Image (cartoon, grey):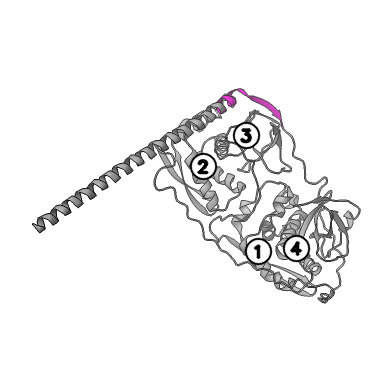
Amino acid sequence: MIHWERNCRQVLLYTFTAFITVLLFSTTAFAQNDYEKWKKEQEAEFKEYRDKFDREFVELLENTWEEVGIKEGSPFYKEKKPIEIPTAPTPPVVKNPSPEDSPPVNEPVNIPEIIDAPPVKIDLPAEKSLFEGLSTNKTTINYFSSSIPFEFPLKLREFFSPNEFITSKTDNKKIADFWEKVSSIDHSPLIEYSQKIRSDLNLNDWGYILLLNDFTNTIFKGYDRKLTSLYNWFLLTKAGYKVRIGYDQQGIYNLFSLEYRVFNTKYFTLDGDQYYIIDMNRHRQTPGSIFTYKGAHQAQSKKLNLRVTQQPNLGDSRSVENKTLSFTFNGTDFKIPLSLDKNLVIYFEYFPLTELPVFFTASLSGNSKTAIHKALAPAIAEMNEEEAVNLILRFVQTSFEYKTDQDQFNREKYMLPEETLFYQYSDCDDRSILFANLVQELLELEVVGLRYSKHLATAVLFNEEVEGDAHYHSGKKFIVADPTYINANVGMTMTQYKNEKPEIVSF
């Protein structure tokens, strides 16, 4: 009897437990189904919202084109830079003043550790295709030394023939048709994936447009180059950039609105903004006038920002060139061994010729920064500010040979600090940029640029009283420091610019 009662209780307990489990499972299932239903409804509503913008944009592309005249981008200098640079009289060796007269820097300069970032491994999403429901092809692009997997729908190639824009006339109807076809494919998962790659590789806007361009060239390899320009325009628009397309009978052009002006580059004024022709494939583009449209896609909200706040991770860290820079200061020889990433040099080779604050605030790579700090920081710690700045001046003035950009590259080019360390030759722009970077990093002193008619120098705001040529900016006294005037100390202006008032460039 007891066993029978116990068994009854167990049966009742098991039955109750099973009932509760089924009830909970059913409730959860219903809740899950409700959530999935709600989620699909939201996705459908958003897709309809997004598709509405594309339909409106197609209508805009069909009806609002006009011919606009091109404007020549202003040159940075009024005259050509000098071919040769004078040498200042060799200053006498001066021992560091005693701490009572002018205190040394004292606090040891922070020496960053070398961070040799390993190549980033990137995988396509494992759970589903980037283009769900479509036949796709998986491919790999070689982005500098990184191999990056991508996926694209086969429809993209089926929409167009390899000679699509060769066998027929380019016009607004043809371009509107391109947008209508390509926008019928949901690209949002691809944009999300590309932006994750951007984050993983520490890419700025410049690196991101190069990434998408490599992807576009891979898809349309063997096709008319106009298709790559159009697909770049489409992807960058979907990524939110203020980019336009323009055409003439010779080609199709990508036009970018930027946060800063770009020099020596043709541009158009459209809806109150300047749009510059930037070709990621390094083709020289020289249209006289183009046809383009009025208005914009609703997705476009941001201008291209070229700031370099961190160096990108471009893959194989063994792609380096070793060199040693040497100079002499106050009778002491200094040697700085460097391992320079050639990928970075290629990455910045055709970086737009934009405004100086972008270059003056760009960082060095971890390897270069560490090597320079290790060589200079111990000596600087025992010097006062003036002597420390003179040491950095001598390093930049005498560790490189002088040559103008026209002679070295056959074009005007500002080099970022990493490039100046890499190349054998540099000119006044490059040296001023490198010098400003080092003074800010090593001494934490404020620096401004001094822009003359055909020369660029710098000036430093000292915490102590320093004699010499000076310029005032925002009520502060900046002492001239010219990284190109060989052997010149702080306070010395290059002879031919003594009587010229420079434009002061703050960054």
Residue 401: x and y in percent read 75, 61
Residue toward you, 369 or 384:
384
Q: CA distance from mark 3 to mark 2?
A: 18 Å
User: Label 2 belongs to which residue?
Assistant: 191
Secondary structure beneath disc 3? strand
Q: Nearer the viewer, mark 1 or mark 2?
A: 2
**Which label is found at residue 40?**
none
Q: CA distance from mark 3 to mark 1?
A: 38 Å
Q: CA distance from mark 4 to mark 2?
A: 42 Å
Q: CA distance from mark 3 to mark 4?
A: 41 Å
Q: CA distance from mark 1 to mark 4?
A: 14 Å
Residue 107: x and y in percent read 71, 72
Label 3 with label 1: CB-CB less than 8 Å: no
Residue type for callout 2: Ile
Label 1 with label 2: CB-CB less than 8 Å: no
Label 3 with label 2: CB-CB less than 8 Å: no
Q: Residue at x 14, y 52 (%)?
A: 8
Residue toward you, 41 or 164:
41
**Range covered by the magenta-colored residues:** 57-69
Q: Could you tell which of marks 1 and 4 lies nearer the N-terminus?
A: 1
Q: Nearer the viewer, mark 3 or mark 2?
A: 2
Q: Nearer the viewer, mark 4 or mark 2?
A: 2
Residue toward you, 88 or 393:
393
Crowding near the residue tagged with mark 2, few <14, some 14–19, many ≥20 C-alpha atoms within 10 Å: some
User: Label 3 belongs to which residue?
Assistant: 244
